[in-house]
Amino acid sequence: MPDSFTARPVAGDRIMFRVLGPLQVEGPTGTVRIPPGRQEIILACLLMEAGRVVGTDRLLDLIWHEEPPDTARTQIQICVSRIRKSFTAAGVGAAVVSRAPGYVLSTDEDTVDLQVFNRQVMASRVLVKEGRIAEAAETLRAAVALWRGPCLSGIPSEALRTRGLRLDEDRLTAIETYLELELGLGRSHEVVGEISRLVHEYPLRERMRGQLMLALYRSGRQAEALEVYREGRALLAEELGLEPGEELRHLESAILAGDPALYAAGAAPHGPEHGRVTVAAAAPTPYGEERPHQLPADTADFVTSEPLVRSIETALVGTDGRRSLGVVVIAGKPGIGKSAMATHIAHRLGGERFPDGQLYCDLRGAGSEPVSAKDALGRFLRALGIPGPVIPDDTDERAEMYRTLLATRRMLVVLDDAANERQISPLLPGSSSCAVLVTSRSRLTALPGAQRVELDVLDQAEALDLLGRVIGADRVRREPEAAAALVRTVGGLPLALRIVAARLAARPHWTLASMVHRLANERHRLDELAHGEMTMRASLSLTHDGLNRADRRLLRLFSLAQGPTMPGWIAGALLDDHRPIPSDLVEPLVDVQMLDAVAVESTGEFRYRFHEVIRLFAREQLALHDSPAVQLAATERMIGGWLAITEQAHARVYGGDFTVLRGSAPRWQPPAAYLDRILADPIEWLDSEQANLCLAVEQAAQAGLDELCWDLATTLVTLFEARGYFDHWERTHERALQVTRAAGNRRGSAAVLSSLGTLHISRQQPEEARRSLGAALEIFDDLGDVHGLALCRRDLALLERQGGDDDRALVLYEHAARDFERVGDIVGRATVLTQSAHIWMRRGHSAVAHAQLEESLEIFRSVGYTRGEAHALRRAGQVQLQRGEHAQAEQTLTGVLTMVRRSRDIIGEGHLLRNLGEVHAATGRYDQARGAFERALAVREQIMDHGGAAAVRLDIARLMARTGAPGQAGELLEHAVVTFRERGMRHELREAERLLEDLAVRRSAAS
C-alpha cells in the first residue's frame, strides 16, 4: 500500500460502511461478508448514493455491460434480498428499501465513510471562512484519513471504478488544500517530508510540486526548490510534451528573484538570524467564490457616539440563534454623517464578522436619476463572479440569482443614499448569515424587519473632539470659548463643522474667534433660510468666498461631472489645462473639504467625490457666474476627454483603431504619461469607469452633443461586449439614437443601429438584429460609407450562419472582408476570416478553413489582439480535430485554455473544456472525456449558466450512450430537455429528443 494511504485515526466511530478503499461493511459482531460480483456492485452503488433512489436500469447498466439477460431484473431482486438478509443476520442498522423506480439505502449519514468525508470537507470550508485555519487543516486531515486505499478497489464495474477515480481525485485535492493551509500556518518544516513523498507518488500534479517548492524555499533550501521545478519540467516534457503551467513558472521566477511576496508581510527568509515564516501567500480566489471588498475609504477623524455604533453593530451581527436577516437603516438630514457612519461601521465589522466580502453601492437616491435595483443587482452579480452574458435581463431573476449566491456566505451589503423601499427590497439577501446597512434621508418605515437609527447632530463634546482632530487640540484648548461658540454656530452638523475646520486648518494664523465672527455675519446674510440649510449655506459660502478665483471656477465647473466618483484629469479638461499631474488642480478644493478624496487607484491616481449638498451649492454658483456657452464648452471638453481615453483603451485592446466607426466630435487629450499609467489594463480601466462613461453618454444627449454622444456610446462596445454589459449597451445606444435622429445625424444613427444589431445577436434576438442591421445598411449604402457597410455585412453574415443559410453567409462574408480591406481595418478582416472558417470546417473543407485561420492568426498576433487570437486558435483546434490530428488539436486547445484562464474568461474556459472532451472522446479516452465534460459542467453550474450546463449534459449523455450506460444517459437527457424547452434552445432540444428516442429503441429491443 502506498505511503500516502497510511491509515490515521478515523474521524467518527459510527462508520459501518466503507467505500473509500475496498468495499467493507462492519456489524456489531465484526466484518459482514458481501459476496464478490453482483452483490458488491449493487451495494457499492447504493452506498455511493446513500439516501437517494438508484434506478433498476442503472443497476442493470453497472452489472451487464452488453445486453442483460431476460432474468436480469429478477437477479437484481435476488441480490437485494440477500443483502438484506446479510444485514439482518449481522445486526447492521440499515435497510435497503424498494422505492420506484429502484432501491434506496436508508442509514444514518454518519455510518457511511463517503458521507462523513464530504461533510468534513464542507466543514473545513466553513472554518476557513471563519478564519479558523488550523482547525480547517486538521478537519481535512481527518477526512483524508478515512481512505484505506483506492476508492472501491476490487469492484468489477468499469463505471464504478470511474466514479472511484473521481473520488480519489477529491482526496488528492483535499490533501493539497490542507497542505496549503498548513503552509499558511508556517509549518513548512513539518510538511516538507510529506509533500516530498506525495510528489514522488504523483509527479505530474503541479499544485503539489509548487507546494513542495514553496515549503523548501521557506525552509531556506532555495537550490532544492529550484531543482524540484527542473525535475518537474523535464518530466512534463518527456511524458506529455508540455511546459509547466503558468503558476509554476511564476513561482520559479519569484524564487529566483527572492520575491518578498513568497513570505508573509513582515516575515523574512529562514536563516540563523530569522524566525519561521508564519503566513502563506494568499491563493487566488476561484471563479464563483469572489470576495468583493467594495467599501469606500474610512474617515480617519470619524467622531460619533460609541454606544450608538455598538448598537448598530449588534443589530447587524445579531446572536448565534438569529434566523432573520440583520437590516439597519441610518436616516438623517444632509450633512449629518450617514455615509461616514455606515462606512466606518462596515470597516469595523468587515473582515472579522463578514469574511466573505462587503458589497457597496451608492444608490444616488437624492439625485435626479437614482440607480435602479436591476442595475445594482447587475453590479453585485459581476462582483460575485457571474460573467455579464450569463446575468438575466429580468430583475426578479437577477434577485433570485443574487440570493442564491449569498445563501451560504457571510457578507455585508452597504446600500448608500437609498431613495425608497422599492429600490432596496430586491437587494436584500435571503440568508441570516448576511447583513444589510442602509443610509437614506427617509426613514424607510415600510422596510420589514429593519432597525432604524436616526442620526442627530454632534453634541458639544463630540463636536469639539472632531474640531480638535482637524485643526489640532492645542488650538481648541487655547480658545475654549470660541471653540464652543463655533460648534454652536454650525449647529453640531458634522459636514458644516468639517468645512469650517478645514478652512481654519488651511489658515493657521486665523483665530477661532475670527471664524465665529465671519460665520455669524454670513448667517445673517442668509437669514431667510431654515436653520439647518442656513448653517450649511453659511459654511459653504464662507469657504467658497475664501478661495482664489481659479479654485472657485474649478469648483463650479466640477459640478458638471455627474459620476459617483471622479478622476483628477476631469479638472484639466474643464479648465483646458494640460499639466502632467491634473490632480494638482483639485487638491486646494480637497484641503478645504469642498471635495473629498475617497480612494487611491492602483495607478496612484486619486478619485474625488462631492457631498451632494456641496454639489448643489456649486451648481447654484455655476448658474450665477458662468454663461450657458461656457458651461457647454466645458462639458464638451470633459466628454471629449472620456471619448479620447475610451478610444485609446479600444486601440490598446485591438492593437489599433479597428472595428469601430469614428465621428468628427472634438477630443480633449489628457497627458500621454497619464494615459499610459491608467491604461496599463485597458479593459479594467473601462470597467472601473463604467458608471461615469455611461453618464457621460447621457450628459452628451442632454446637452445636444449628438456627435459626441453616438461616438462615445459605440466606442464603449469594447467594454460592453467584453464584460457582457448588455443593459448599459442598450440604454446608451437608445439614448444616442434619440439624439442623433433629432439632430438629423444620419451617419451617427446608422452607427448606433449597426451596434444595436450586434447587441441583439449577442442576446440571441435574430429578428431584432436583422431589422437594426438592415436599417443601418440602407443608410450606410446611401452615404457610401464603406466601413459601415463592412460592419453590417459581417453581422448579417453571422445571422445567416446561425440561421443555417451558409451560402448567403459566405457571400456576405466575402463582401465584408473586401470592404474591411479597402478601409484598412485588418482586424475586421481577420474576424470575418475566423467566422467564415467555421462554415468551411462544417462543410468539410478543412484546407480552406485552415488557410483562413492562419491568415487571421497572423493579423491578430501582429497587432496584439489576444482575444481574437484565442478565438481563432480555438477554431484551429476544432479544424485539427476534424482532420484527425488529435495530438495537435489537444495541444492547441490546451494552449487556448491557458489563455482564457489567464484572462479570467470563465465562459471561454467552459467552451475549451468541452472541446477537449470532444478530442478525448474521439481518441477513445472516455474517462478523460467525461472528466473534461464534467469540469465544463461544473464551470457552467458555478456561474449559474443553466442553458450552457444543459448543453454539456447533452455531451455527457452522448458519451454515456456510446460507452454502454444508457440509464445514466437517459437521466441526463431528461434533465437537459426541460432546460432546452424553458430557454427555447431548439437545436439542442431536437438533438436531445432524438437521442432519447434512440435510447428508447435500444431499451425496447433489449427487452
Image (tube, rainbow, N blue to C red):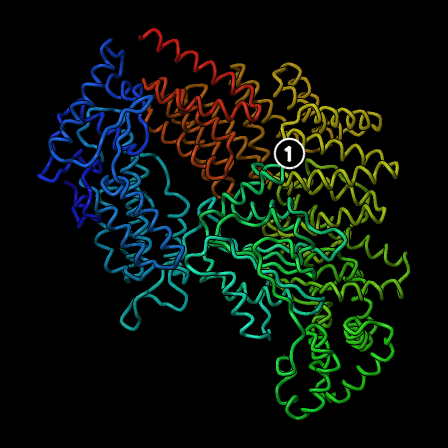
**Residue topped by disc 1:** 827
Q: Nearer the viewer, residue 480 or 453?
A: 453
Q: Nearer the viewer, residue 976 or 874?
A: 976
Q: Nearer the viewer, residue 358 or 909?
A: 358
Q: Secondary structure at mark 1?
A: helix
* Residue under the image location 36 percent in, 28 percent down: 930
Q: Nearer the viewer, residue 376 or 631?
A: 376
Q: Residue furthest bottom?
A: 478
List x then y, in percent, for residue 218.
31, 61
Please say whether residue 203 is visible from this viewpoint.
no
Residue 75 versus residue 149 in the image, above or below: above
Please say whether residue 925 is visible from this viewpoint.
yes
Q: Residue furthest top?
A: 1005
Is 530 left, or right, of 109 in this rendering? Answer: right
List x then y, in percent, for residue 843.
54, 14
* Residue under the image location 68 percent in, 66 percent down: 332
List x then y, in percent, for residue 712.
74, 44
In the rendered image, which quarter contains the N terminus? top left
Three-letter code, disc 1: Val
Residue 579 versus residue 697 in the image, above or below: below
* Residue under the image location 32 percent in, 22 percent down: 55
